[in-house]
Image: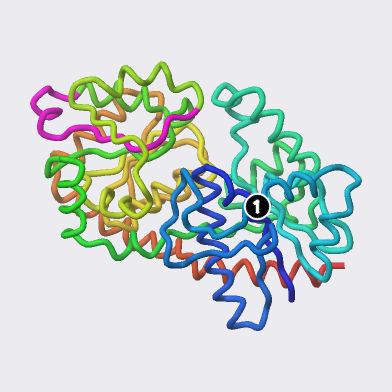
Amino acid sequence: MRITIDATTLLLPSAGVKNYIYYWLRALAVAAYARGDSIRAYPPLLMLNPAAPLNHQQADGVLFPSWLLPLVRLSNRCGNPLLDWLLHGVDVFHCSQHTARRPRRMKTTATIFDFSCWTRPETHTPQNIAATKRYAENILKRCDRLIAISAHARQDAFEVLGIPLDRIRVIYPGVATEFFEVTDHQAASVRTMYNLPQSYFLFVGCIEPRKNIRGLIAAYKTLPEAVQREVPLVIAGPFGWESDAVRPLLASQNVLYLGYVPEVRLPALFRGATALVYPSYYEGFGLPVAQAMAAGIPVITSTSSSLPEVVGDAGLTVNPDSTADLAGALQRVLTSTAVARDLGCRGRARAQAYRWEAAAIASLDFFHDVLQDN
């Protein structure tokens, strides 16, 4: 079977979706080779460099000629047969949010990531909402079958877009192997690199309203001053939309903002943390939660969207709008070594469900089923 994945996002600076496509495509290539299937990336000639770490700000993990992005834009123009010509002989084409129209003469699929543009529109720009809804109408509603990265995302697709549940299969994303294998020695090296203390709370993600960073800092600031001095709040991630209001908070006492941290350093940054604190309002999956569990540290996250599904009983879940609940969870992890150790152990065990190898095998089964549909 010949499968082509739209990997246009690898040509652009982005974060979550780029991480998904990069590691998923690499795992698919390995699994497909073992089964005699063919996996290709679109645009053509796009090659993944396994030796290069993923860099979300650039495309360091990808080798491609400069003319590929203009080619994608040209092939997306209505009425242009270029996309169909480039995909000649393909059995299944997996669309991305950069696919403006479905190719003809083949099965088409896509991945459902999240529906925050519908459920939390205040956390997005009008332009992003318009583009996402246009993609939903032109691609998601018209694909033969869909992959959802969580059961919550699958249910949202049914409730928001009316897509039948039997057209959607849940396949969880994976966590890079480095998070499972990170050592305390590596954690110590990264602490030295960023001048971090022995203990710190950690948040990793884009600085934008949906992540509830203002609520996180407000809850952290209710902890005793002595506790804050001993265990600072470390925040890592690039600035996103409407982040100006948060910038002064990131400069407040005992809050350490690291900015964008390269992917290669993230496993050690996670491993050295006292706990990951991730009180997001909405996530299609919540990759940092799974990464923290793989690294063996406690997770504090919110009760909203897919996050309880991902963390299960291996983390503490709180109302993201409750400062008291979030502060209480921080105190609980700090004051009880037994609780922290138990959460770390349970998290590491649960994270085994989020392996890219398993995701790739399940995805190939999905593509075979799609091809056999009438």
What element does badge 1 sit on? strand
54 part of magenta stretch:
no
The figure's colour scheme reads rainbow
302 displayed left or right of 36:
left
**In terms of image quadrants, where is residue 37?**
bottom right
Q: Nearer the viewer, residue 46 or 186?
A: 46
Q: Which residues are magenta?
A: 223-240
Residue in view at x 40 percent, y 30 percent: 319
Looking at the rendered image, the quarter that the C terminus falls into is bottom right
Coordinates of residue 96 in the picture (x, y in percent):
68, 50
Coordinates of residue 230 in the picture (x, y in percent):
10, 33
Q: Residue furthest front?
A: 66
178 is higher (above) or lower (below) than 80? below
226 part of magenta stretch:
yes
Coordinates of residue 116 in the picture (x, y in percent):
59, 33
336 displayed left or right of 259:
left
10 Å crowding of disc 1: few (<14), some (14-19), many (20+): many
Coordinates of residue 152 in the picture (x, y in percent):
57, 45
Q: Amino acid at mark 1?
A: Thr
Looking at the rendered image, the quarter that the N terminus falls into is bottom right
Residue in view at x 48 percent, y 36 percent: 304
Residue in view at x 73 percent, y 49 percent: 72
Q: Nearer the viewer, residue 280 or 321?
A: 280
Q: Nearer the viewer, residue 325 or 171?
A: 171
Does residue 243 appear in the picture of this structure? yes
67 is higher (above) or lower (below) than 369? above
Does residue 166 appear in the picture of this structure? no
Reading the image, the residue beneath label 1 is: 111
**In terms of image quadrants, where is residue 331?**
top left
**In terms of image quadrants, where is residue 316?**
top left
Residue in view at x 80 percent, y 42 percent: 138
Number of marks in picture: 1
